[in-house]
């Protein structure tokens, strides 16, 4: 017998809160660090199809969780560094899988970056739009936000639903 919730239980627990903007919605009632049932997957994919951008607030996801979750939307693509043959960044910790790109403006005590594209070098885009079969979705996970100006905070949160 499975520990995953039944279809009915999954649908009762989850909710879609539209942003009332052109796109975007928050999904509540699911812990993405746990296995996702077929019913939950269907719910998420349907919400994604209808809203194009999804927010799952308050999730604590490991690298393993992110690699598992990317398959909710279809076969995983390659990270930009893989598509472009750039290889692994020397400053990345060994525990960061090659399929994950760390985007950060944080530097360590020695002045070395902990991630790539951290100082406004890139805005939202997809690295695989030129491939024969582009990916169907991109997954981002915010680990921490150190500080934002009030203008940057407004731009970042403008289309997010208010926290319940």
Image (cartoon, rainbow, N blue to C red):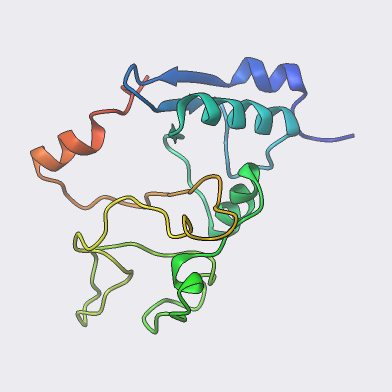
Residue 132, position in %: x, y? 58, 59
Res 107 quadrant in image: bottom left
In the picture, the quarter occupied by the N terminus is: top right
Residue 133, position in %: x, y? 60, 55
Question: Which residue is more in the foreground, 106 or 86?
Answer: 86
Residue 99, position in %: x, y? 54, 66
Task: Report the side of 156 relative to 97 (left or right).
Answer: left
Task: Report the side of 156 relative to 69 (left or right).
Answer: left
Give the tally of numbered discs: 0
| Residue beneath the point at 10% across and 44% down | 149
Q: Is residue 55 above or below residue 28?
A: below
| Residue beneath the point at 40% across and 80% down | 89
Q: Is residue 81 above or below residue 68?
A: below
Res 33 quadrant in image: top right
| Residue beneath the point at 45% across and 74% down | 84
Q: For the view shown, which residue lies furthest in the left direction?
A: 150
Residue 29, position in %: x, y? 55, 25
Question: Which residue is more in the foreground, 63 or 103?
Answer: 103
In the picture, the quarter occupied by the C terminus is: top left
Q: Is residue 131 above or below residue 5?
A: below
| Residue beneath the point at 43% across and 65% down | 101
């Amino acid at each position: 017998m499975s520990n995953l919730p039944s279809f009915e239980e999954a649908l009762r627990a989850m909710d879609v809160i539209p942003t009332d903007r052109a796109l975007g919605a928050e999904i509540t009632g699911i812990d993405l660090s746990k296995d996702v049932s077929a019913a939950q997957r269907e719910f998420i994919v349907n919400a994604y199809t209808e809203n194009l951008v999804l927010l799952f607030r308050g999730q604590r996801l490991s690298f393993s969780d992110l690699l598992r979750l990317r398959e909710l939307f279809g076969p995983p693509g390659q990270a930009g560094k893989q598509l472009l043959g750039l290889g692994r960044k020397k400053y990345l910790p060994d525990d960061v899988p090659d399929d994950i790109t760390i985007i950060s403006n944080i530097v360590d005590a020695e002045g070395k970056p902990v991630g790539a594209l951290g100082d406004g070098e890139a805005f939202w885009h997809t690295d695989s739009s030129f491939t024969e079969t582009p990916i169907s979705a991109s997954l981002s996970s915010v680990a921490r936000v150190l500080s934002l100006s009030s203008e940057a905070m407004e731009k970042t949160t403008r289309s997010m639903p208010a926290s319940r």
